[in-house]
Amino acid sequence: MATSDTTVLTISPRDVEGSRATRRLRRQGLIPGILYGRGGDPLPFTVDARELSHALRASGAVVELQLDGQSTSAVLKDAQHHPVRGETTHVDFLRVDLTKPIEAVVTIELLGAEDAPGIKEGGILDQTMREVNVEALPNEIPETVQLDVSSLNIGDSLPLSAVVIPDKVKLLDDPEATAASMLAPRLQTEEDEGIEEETGIVGESAGDDSEGAGDSGDES
């Protein structure tokens, strides 16, 4: 049964007929997908592209997939996208038991970067880890987790343990791993040296041409 934290998505069964049929589905505004897991047979399906887009933008990890009046709790396991247009071309959903914890990958959202002293001094914020692996009940999986970097000075770093993890969520990654660092600004002399080196090459080339011209004059 769907809860206030879940999104309902209506799907239809489909026959697997190859890439030509798949392209035809996409022209009709449908996205192919597959539902698997929990010992059940894989179920190929189609879903309306707009409804899918809305569902993936909604908060909450669990989606209730409805087929022929029956509902199945699932989470998005993988999504493929067009390399140029970026639109979703295929989705994989995994059946879940709402009473049993699952593992998931969650995006780390940085907070307060513009207020960090290191940024004001010209430093560069390096986000070493952009995602974390967590374990929780399906309905407890957060959409994102947050890391406050507003106190970072140049040379400072924050471990993964500084990421705010909800109480009912277990972090699976090493808490001592570096999540973000404030690097020193790049030296402007590096760019200057590159310009000087290029200028030097041009000068040498011009000098060579001049010498060549002089030699030619002597020979004549």
Image: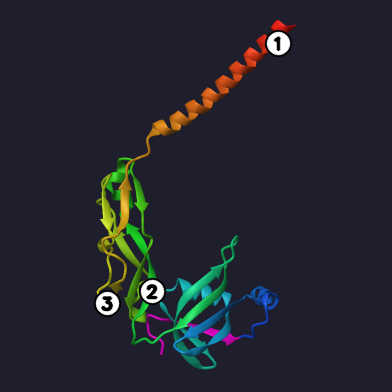
Residue 51: x and y in percent read: 53, 77
Q: Amino acid at mark 1?
A: Ser
Residue 216 circle label: 1
Q: Is residue 205 left or right of residue 194?
A: right
Residue 104 circle label: 2
State the separation of the CA atoms marked 2 and 1: 74 Å
Q: Nearer the viewer, residue 106 or 52?
A: 106
Determine the secondary structure under disc 3: loop
Mark positioned earlier in the residue sequence (3 or 1): 3
Residue matched to label 3: 168
Residue 202: x and y in percent read: 57, 23
Q: Residue shown at 27%/52% (left/top)?
A: 157
| Magenta-tinted stretch | 1-13
Task: Please say whether residue 146 is one of the residues in the magenta stretch.
Answer: no
Task: Please say whether residue 10 is one of the residues in the magenta stretch.
Answer: yes
Q: Say few, some or many: other residues with alpha carbon within 10 Å of mark 1 (under 14 / 14 to 19 / 20 or more).
A: few
